[in-house]
Image: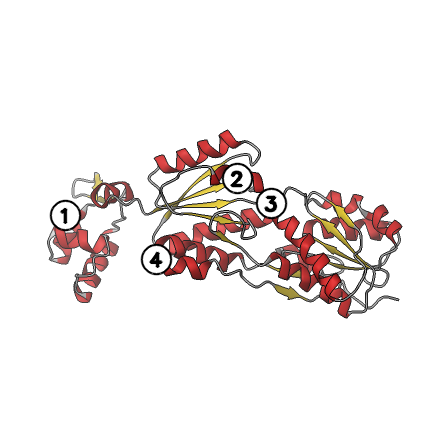
C-alpha cells in the first residue's frame, strides 16, 4: 500500500486524485498516463509521472486490471526449477518482465504429473495472466500442454524448439561447438557424459555430439548417462577410463565438476591426460580446477525475447522463435592428446 503522511500524523493512501491535483490535470488524464494511452502529450505525461514520483505513488495493478481488463501479469509454469538452466531462465524472465512493466506469477508442477500441470495452468489463468511461459524441459510436459485449450498465448522454454511455440538456445549447435573444440585440438576418441534421457535438451546435445563426430568422420564415442549432478559425473570416471577416450564432452558444468574431481582422485590429469568441455558456463565454471572450457547459453536474451513476444508485437513471436546461437568459452581444460 502507498501512503503519505497527513497533517494529523496519521497516514493515508496516495491516490489518483492526489497525483492529478499536484500535476494540475484531471483524474482521467492520470488514468491515461497509467494505462500508457498514446494521446497524452509528452509534457503532460512527464508532469504526471513527476507528480507520482514526488508523492511516492505506486501503481495498483489490481485496480488497473479492473479498469483495463488487463493484469499486466505473465505466468510462469515450471518444473525442475532447481536445475541451473530453468532457474536462471525464471530469474531472467522476472527481470525482463519487470523492465517491461509486467509482474510474474509462478506455478510449479512435477513434470511427470499431468494433473499437476493442468492444475498449474488453471491456477495461472485464474490469476488473469496475459500469457504463460512454460519452462518445460521434458517431452511429457509438452504432451500434456498440447492436449489443453488454454486460450491465451503460451511459449515454451528449454523444450529445444519442440511442441508449442518454443524458444531455445540451439542445443545441437552448442554440442557441436563442444565436440569441434575437442576435435580441433586433435582428439579422435571422445566420450559424451549425457544428461537424463527424458530431458529434451539432453537428447539434443546427444544428437549434436553424434552429428559433429559423423561430420568429421570420427568414431562415435560412448554416451554415458548422468543426471545433471556432480555426483553422476564423479561416478562416471570408471566407465570413461575403461572406454580409453582422451576427451569428454559433459552435458552440463555440474557433471563436468564431478568428473574433474573423480579424474583427479584417480591420478588422471586434466587436460594433460583427458580434456573436458562442459555446457552452460555457470558462474563457478571459471573457478574450477582447471578452469572449465564450456558452452555458454544466453538466458538473458532468451528471457528478453520471451517477454517481447508475449507483450509487444505479433511479429515478435516469429523473430523470438529463431534459435539463439550458443558461444564457446575457451579456458584451461582442453589440450592436445598425448
Give the residue pinned by disc 3: 83
Tag in front: 2 or 3: 2
Label located before the other in sequence (1 or 2): 1
Residue 143 numbered tag? 2
Q: How far apart in space, not on screen, are marks 4 and 1 (Cα)? A: 30 Å
- Identify the residue at horizontal 67%, vertical 64% (top origin): 177
Q: How far apart in space, not on screen, are marks 3 and 4 (Cα)? A: 29 Å
Q: Is residue 33 above or below residue 110?
A: below
Q: Is residue 88 left or right of residue 281?
A: left
- Place residue 289 in its image quadrant: bottom right
In this rendered view, identify the residue nearer to me: 100 or 144.
144
Q: Is residue 56 above or below residue 330?
A: above
Tag in front: 4 or 1: 4
Give the residue pinned by disc 1: 17
In this rendered view, identify the residue nearer to me: 247 or 58.
247
Please rate how many residues cluster around mark 1, counting C-alpha atoms within 10 Å: few if below 14, some from 14 to 19, many from 20: some
Tag in front: 1 or 2: 2
| Mark 4 residue element | loop
User: Is the residue under label 1 in contact with that under label 3 (CB below 8 Å)?
Assistant: no
Q: Is residue 216 left or right of residue 245?
A: left
Q: Position of residue 201 (x, y in %)?
A: 61, 50
User: Is the residue under label 4 in contact with that under label 3 (CB below 8 Å)?
Assistant: no
Label located before the other in sequence (4 or 2): 2
Residue 312 numbered tag? 4
Q: Position of residue 86 (x, y in %)?
A: 55, 47
Amino acid at each position: 500500500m502507498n501512503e503519505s503522511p497527513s497533517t494529523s500524523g496519521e497516514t493515508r493512501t496516495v491516490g489518483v486524485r492526489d497525483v492529478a491535483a499536484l500535476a494540475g490535470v484531471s483524474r482521467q488524464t492520470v488514468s491515461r498516463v497509467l494505462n500508457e494511452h498514446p494521446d497524452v502529450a509528452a509534457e503532460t505525461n512527464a508532469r504526471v509521472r513527476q507528480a507520482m514520483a514526488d508523492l511516492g505513488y505506486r501503481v495498483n495493478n489490481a485496480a488497473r486490471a479492473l479498469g483495463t481488463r488487463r493484469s499486466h501479469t505473465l505466468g510462469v509454469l515450471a518444473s525442475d526449477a532447481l536445475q541451473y538452466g530453468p532457474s536462471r531462465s525464471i530469474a531472467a524472465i522476472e527481470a525482463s518482465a519487470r523492465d517491461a512493466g509486467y509482474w510474474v506469477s509462478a506455478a510449479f508442477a512435477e513434470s511427470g504429473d499431468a494433473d499437476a500441470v493442468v492444475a498449474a495452468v488453471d491456477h495461472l489463468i485464474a490469476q488473469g495472466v496475459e500469457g504463460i511461459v512454460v519452462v518445460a524441459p521434458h517431452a511429457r510436459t509438452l504432451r500434456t500442454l498440447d492436449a489443453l485449450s488454454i486460450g491465451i498465448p503460451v511459449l515454451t522454454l528449454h523444450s529445444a524448439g519442440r511442441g508449442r511455440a518454443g524458444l531455445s538456445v540451439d542445443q545441437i549447435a552448442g554440442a557441436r561447438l563442444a565436440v569441434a573444440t575437442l576435435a580441433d585440438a586433435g582428439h579422435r576418441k571422445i566420450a559424451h557424459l549425457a544428461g537424463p534421457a527424458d530431458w529434451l535438451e539432453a537428447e539434443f546435445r546427444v544428437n549434436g555430439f553424434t552429428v559433429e563426430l559423423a561430420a568429421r568422420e570420427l568414431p562415435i564415442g560412448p554416451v554415458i548417462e548422468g543426471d545433471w549432478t556432480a555426483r553422476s559425473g564423479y561416478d562416471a570416471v570408471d566407465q570413461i577410463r575403461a572406454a580409453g577416450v582422451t576427451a569428454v564432452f559433459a552435458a552440463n558444468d555440474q557433471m563436468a565438476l564431478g568428473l574433474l574431481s573423480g579424474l583427479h582422485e584417480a591420478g588422471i590429469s586434466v587436460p594433460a591426460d583427458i580434456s573436458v568441455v562442459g555446457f552452460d558456463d555457470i558462474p563457478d565454471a571459471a573457478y574450477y580446477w582447471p578452469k572449465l572450457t564450456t558452452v555458454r547459453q544466453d538466458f538473458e536474451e532468451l528471457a528478453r525475447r520471451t517477454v517481447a513476444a508475449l507483450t509487444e508485437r505479433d511479429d515478435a513471436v516469429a523473430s523470438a522463435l529463431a534459435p539463439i546461437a550458443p558461444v564457446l568459452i575457451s579456458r584451461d581444460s582442453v589440450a592436445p592428446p598425448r
